[in-house]
Image (spheres, rainbow, N blue to C red):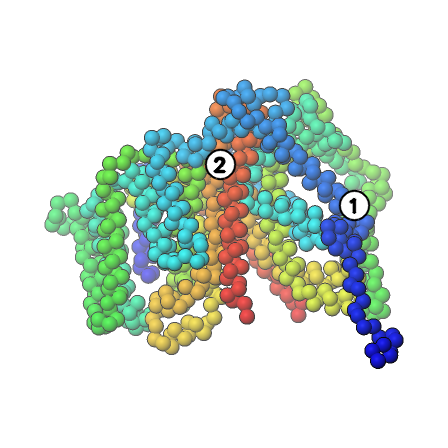
Amino acid sequence: MEHSVAYVRTEDAPILKPPANLVGVRGWVMANLFPNWSNSILTVVAALFAYWVLSNVLGWAIFRATWTGESRDACIVEGAGACWPFVQAKFAQWIYGFYPIDQRWRVNVCFFVGAAALIPLLMPSLPYKKWNALFLLFAFPLLALILLTGGHFSFGFGAFISFVVQFLAIVAAFLPLTVFGIENGIKSAKPGLILVGLGLVLRVLSYAFDIPLPAILDGVSTTYLIALLLMLAGGAWGLLQVLGAGPQASRPVLRAWLSGGVALLLVAILLKWDFGLEYVETSQWGGLLVTLVVAITGIVFSLPVGILLALGRRSNMPIVKYFSIGFIEIWRGVPLITVLFMASYMLPLFLPPGTNFDKLTRVLIGIALFSSAYMAEVVRGGLQAIPKGQIEAAQALGLPYWSTMNLIVLPQALRIVIPGIVNSFISLFKDTTLVTVVGLYDLMGIVIAGFADAKWASSQTAPTGYFTAALLFWVFCFGMSRYSQYVERRLNTGHKR
Amino acid sequence: MVVALAAVGYELYVNASANLAKLGKTFGFDFWDKSAGFDISQSLIPYTSSSSYGTAIIVGFLNTLLIAGFGILFATVIGFTVGIMRLSKNWLISRIATVYVETIRNIPLLLQIFIWYGAVLKPLPGPKQAINVGGFYLSNRGLNMPSPIFEGAAWMGLVGLAGGIVGAILLRRWARARQLATGEAFPYISVGLALVVFTPFLGLVLAGWPVAWEVPVMGAFQLSGGVTVNPEFIALLIALSVYTASFIAEIVRAGIQAVSHGQTEAAGALGLRQTLITRLVTIPQAMRIIIPPLASQYLNLTKNSSLAVAIAYPDLVAMGGTVLNQTGKAIEIVLIWMIVYLTLSLLTSSFMNWYNSRMKLVER
C-alpha cells in the first residue's frame, strides 16, 4: 500500500550545501570585496592605499622608532622613526605643566576624586544619581579649586557678606513668583521688585557720585547704604508676601532660599580657610591639568546657565525671551577665538576699577559664557521634544511654573539630551586647545612648547609630539563619543513603540 | 527685569569709561585712517606698510572670505565623496571611510592645523630643491603655480563662457519641454557641461589664442613669477577642508540613509535604472535633510578659519589682533570682529533658509 503511488517520495530529498561561492569566507569576500569588475578594481586600489598608509604609520611609530635614549643623540640617526624617549622625558610635564613637583599629589587627588565620582555617574545601573551629580557639579569644583590653588583666598569678608545679603534680597523679592505663579506673583511682588530695582540703580550710580550727606559710618558711601536699605526692604516685602501664603506653600520656598544663603556663606568660609597648602599660581598650571580644568569648568558652568537660557528662550515674557535669544545668538555667531581675545583684552575694561583676574580665570569666564550658549541650544532641543500635554497636565494639577519645570519637564528633557550634552563636551574638550593662542599651556600648547628644548631637537621630535598629542585627544574624544552612542541606544529602546 | 538689565548695562558703561580714562584712552574709530606700518604676507588688494589700519583690516576680511570660500568648496567635495564611500557595499571602501571620519573628527582642529603646517609643509625642501610637477613647485615657501596672462582679445574667452552658460540653460529648458511633451529624455547635463567647457576655448581660438603662461623661474634664492600660495594658506585650507569634510560625510550618510527604502524600491519597480534612482529619487529627498546641518557646517568652517591666527595667516582675526596690539583699541576691534562674523552667519543662515524653503516647495 505504501508504495502504490510510485512518484511520491517517502523521505525528504537530501539537504544540499549552499553553493561554495555564497557562504563562508569565500562567499563573504565575493559579495563584499569582488562582486563585479569595477568593484574589484576599487578593492585592489583601496587595499594598496590602506597597506601604504598602515605600513608607513606602523613603520614610523613602531618598527623604525627609537625606543631608548637620554637625549637627541638617540633620535638623530639617519632613517629613524618616532622619537619615543622624548615623550618619556616630557610626559610628566604634559600632565602637570609646571606645577611644583612636590605638590603634584594635589593634582593626583583631584584626578582621582573626579574619576571616582564620574565613573559611577556614567554607569546607568548604579543608584544615587542625583546626589552623585550634585557632588560632581558643586562639591567637586570647590574641592578642586581649593586643592589646586591652595585656597586661603584674600577677599574682603565684609564685602562678600554684603554681596550675599544683596543677592539674597534680590532673590527674596522674586520669591512670590514661585509661590503664586507668574501673573498673581508679579502682582504681589511688584512693590518689592520696584524697591529692589531702585536700590540696584542707586547702587550703580554710587560709583559715579555720592549724595553729599554726612557719612553715618566711616568709609561707607551714603548712596551705597541707602541702596542697600532699599534692596533689603524689597526683599523683606517679598518674604512677607510668601509668608502670607500660609506655611504649606511657603515652607519649601523659604527652605530653599535659606539653604542657598547658608551654602554661599559656607563656600565663603571654605575659600577663606587656611588649610596650610602652598599657594600655586595658575601660571604654573599646564598640560592635561589645564585642558581638564577648562573643559570641566565650561561644562559645569554651562549646564545650569544653559538650562536657564533655554527656559528663557521659550518664556512668554518678552524681555526674558529676547535677552536669551540675543545672548545665545551673539555667542554662537562669533568664533571662540574672538571670545578668548575678548576675555583677555576687553573683559578687564568692563570690570570695576581695581578688580583684576589672572589670565586663566578670564579665559574660563569666556569659555563658560560661550559654552552656555551652545548648551542652551542643546537643552532647547530636549524641551521641544516634550509634548505640550505634559505641561498642560501639570498646570491642570495646579503646579506653579518652577515646579512644572523641576518635576515634570526638565527630568524628561535632560534625559533625552544626555547624548547632546556629551557631544558638546567633546567639542568643548577639543576647543580647549584654543587657549594656547592667548598664551596658556594646555595639553597641546605644552607639547608644542617642548619642541623648543635644545636637548631634544631633532627632525623627529615635532612629528612624535604631534602624534602623541593627537593620540591622547583621540582616545578621550573617541571614548566619549562611544559613550554617547551607548546612551543613545539605551534611550532609544525606552522610547520605541 | 528691565531695571536690572539697564542697571547692569549702565554699570558696565561706567566701569569701561572709568578704565579707559585711567589708561588715557578714548573710544573711537579714529585709528582707521592712520598708517599701519606693518607688512602682510598675502593680500588680495594693493597693500603696503604705509597703508592705513582700515585697509589692513579689510585685507584680513578678504583673506577670511578667500579661505572660507575655498574651504567650503573642498570640504563639500571631500565630504560628499567620503559620505557616499561610507555607504558603499564594498566592505574595504566603507571601512576606510569610517576610519577617516572617526579619526579626523576626534582630533582638535587646531592640532591638525599645526600638524599640516609644522610636520608636513615645513620639513619640505627649500625653494632650490622644490618638488616640481609640470610647472608647479612645492617647497617650504609654499606652492608656486604658473599664472595665465591675458592680452588682446582675451575677453572673447569670457564671451564664450557666457554664451556657453546661456546655451546650457536654454538646452535644459528645451530638453525639459520636450520630455514633457513627448516623454523622450535628452542627456542635457553632459551636453550642457561640454558646452560650458568648450565654448570659452572656441572664443579664445577665434581670437587667435591670446593667452600666455607665466611659469615660475628659479632665481638666485627663490622662485619668482607665476602665482605663489603661502604655506600658511595651504596648511589652513587642507586642515579646514579635511576636518569639516568628516562632519559633512556624516551628514551626507545620515541624509541618504534617512530616505526610506520603500522609495528606492518603488522607483526600481517602475523600471528606473540605478543611476536614475539615485539622481531623481534618492538625492532630491536626501538633500532636504542634508541642507540645514550642512549650512551650519559651512558656518562652522567660516568661524574656524579664525584659527588662522595660530599660524600667522593674515585673516580678519589675525589682522585685528595685530592692530589691537599696536593701537590698544580693544573694544573697537572686538566690535568689528563681532559685527563681521555675526553678519556672515546671518547671511549664510538666511541664504540656506531661502534655499531650504525652495527645496521644500519643489517637493510638495
In the rendered structure, which amino acid carries the disc numbered 1? Ile
- For the residue pair B97 and B218, the one nearer the viewer reads as B97
Classify mark 1: helix, strand or loop: helix
Q: Residue at x 47, y 54 (%)?
A: A421
Q: Residue at x 33, y 61 (%)?
A: B1
Horizontal side, residue A266 vs residue A37: left or right? left
> Which label sits in the foreground, 1 or 2?
1
In the rendered structure, which amino acid carries the disc numbered 2? Met
The answer, for residue B337, to whether it is visible in the render is: no
Q: Position of residue B190 (x, y in %)?
A: 81, 54
Density class for disc 1 (Cα within 10 Å; few <14, some 14-19, many ≥20) is: few
Q: Quadrant of residue B251?
A: bottom right
Q: Which residue has dot 1 on it?
A: A41
Q: Report the residue that reaches farthest toward the front.
A: A1
Relative to A307, does residue B244 appear above or below in the rendering? above
**N-term mark: 1 or 2:** 1
Q: Position of residue A330 (x, y in %)?
A: 46, 52
Classify mark 2: helix, strand or loop: helix
**Screen quadrant of the N terminus of chain A:** bottom right
- For the residue pair B30 and B275, the one nearer the viewer reads as B275
Horizontal side, residue A253 vs residue A122: left or right? left
Q: Position of residue A484 (x, y in %)?
A: 51, 54
Residue B34's disc is: none
Relative to A54, does residue B247 appear above or below in the rendering? below
The answer, for residue B236, to whether it is visible in the render is: yes
Density class for disc 2 (Cα within 10 Å; few <14, some 14-19, many ≥20) is: many
Q: Which residue has dot 2 on it?
A: A444
Q: Position of residue A497 (x, y in %)?
A: 55, 70
